[in-house]
Amino acid sequence: MLPVRIEPFSAATLPAVAAIEAATPAPWNAAQLAAELERPGGWGAVARYEDGTIIGYLCGYTVADEAEILKVAVAGSWRRQGVAAQLMTHALAGLAAQGVRRVFLELRVGNQPARKLYEKFGFGQAGIRRDYYRNPAEDALLMEKTVIRGEGS
């Protein structure tokens, strides 16, 4: 597993996050990413490599005792080295500490690597959203997880 530092996603890290996001299918622009952090309950984290390069990020929001993970992305050359798993561990520990009981996320049904990662963290299928994604058109798989107190600590 690649050693990274997990830090808060902030205005200072936004340009690096936007660059990572730009390489994803149906990317959000910097303004959309900033708006998610500024929304009530919005949060995020970045993964920084030892040389200071931001190589991945995760963002979401919390309402009462539920949270939704909106985006998880790792820069192309850094994928499949445990960066997303470290971001998920950090996020789930933080959510558990806040008293969050359920976490939701969506992904393209064809994104098997992401699905395997989320299943590893205890997410299960909660439903399908037909024709949810565009460019290319694809269904969304809705996944849900019950958060365990003390998780990730």
Image: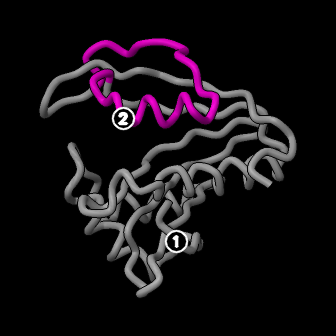
The residue that label 2 is drawn on is 113
Q: Quadrant of the C terminus?
A: bottom right
Name the amino acid type tagged 2.
Pro
The residue that label 1 is drawn on is 4
Instruction: Using residue 65 as the reference point, say whether residue 3 is left or right of it.
Output: left
- The quadrant holding residue 110 is top left
Name the amino acid type tagged 1.
Val
Q: Are marks 2 and 1 in contact (CB under 8 Å)?
A: no
Q: CA distance from mark 2 to mark 1?
A: 20 Å
In the rendered image, residue 91, in percent from the top left (x then y), is placed at: 64, 53
Is disc 1 placed on a helix, strand or loop? Answer: loop
Q: Which residues are magenta?
A: 109-132
- Residue 83 falls within the magenta-colored stretch: no
Q: Closest to the observer: 29 or 76? A: 76
Q: Residue at x 33, y 55 (%)?
A: 79
Of the two numbered discs 2 and 1 on the same chain, state the one appearing first in sequence.
1
Q: Residues within 10 Å of mark 2 (few under 14, many from 20)?
A: few
Q: Is residue 67 above or below residue 146?
A: below
Q: Residue at x 52, y 62 (%)?
A: 37
Q: Is residue 31 above or below residue 89?
A: below
In the rendered image, residue 14, in percent from the top left (x then y), is placed at: 39, 73
Instruction: Using residue 43 as the reference point, say whether residue 76 is left or right of it.
Output: left
Q: Residues within 10 Å of mark 1 (few under 14, many from 20)?
A: many
Q: Residue at x 55, y 49 (%)?
A: 60
